[in-house]
Image: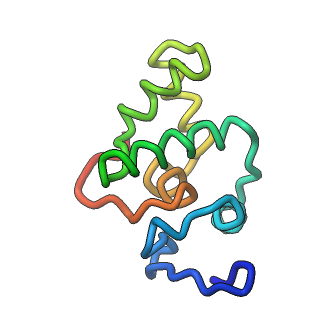
Amino acid sequence: MQINNKEIELDVEGYLVHPEDWNKEIALELAKSENITLTEDYWTIFYFMRNYYNEHGVAPDVRHTTKQMAIDFDLDKKSAKAKLFNLFPYGYVKQACKISGMKRPRGWSTG
């Protein structure tokens, strides 16, 4: 994928090979490939995911993300999870992790 005259390396499933390459322009392109139009709610989630990744070196699992969403969006846990899957109808790993610039998580549940 080419962004601002820079080649961004994706794996065969469309995830970033180098998560440190992630930026807003890349997120917009990845979202386009998933037919998602990004709103402020998406950015709130992505920035949490990026901060978690930078601190822990791995993508947050869905429990961590929905826990933070409950705080950020003033929701109960069940409503936060419903909102997450409404925003990413094809799944947390398939869409949220991809668009937020994570490598594809291996070996853990998406929900």
| Residue 24, horizontal then vertical, whole percent | 68, 59
Q: Residue at x 52, y 18 (%)?
A: 71
| Residue 2, horizontal then vertical, whole percent | 68, 84
Q: How is the image coloured?
A: rainbow
Is 43 positioned to the left or the right of 85 in the image?
right
Q: How many marks?
A: 0
Furthest residue toward front: 55
93 vs 3: above or below: above
Q: Residue at x 65, y 43 (%)?
A: 43
Could you say which quadrant of the image residue 36 lies in? Answer: bottom right
In-front residue for pair 57/98: 57
Is 93 positioned to the left or the right of 8 in the image?
left
Q: Residue at x 44, y 73 (%)?
A: 18
26 vs 58: above or below: below
In-front residue for pair 89/40: 40
Furthest residue toward left: 107
Could you say which quadrant of the image residue 82 lies in? Answer: top right
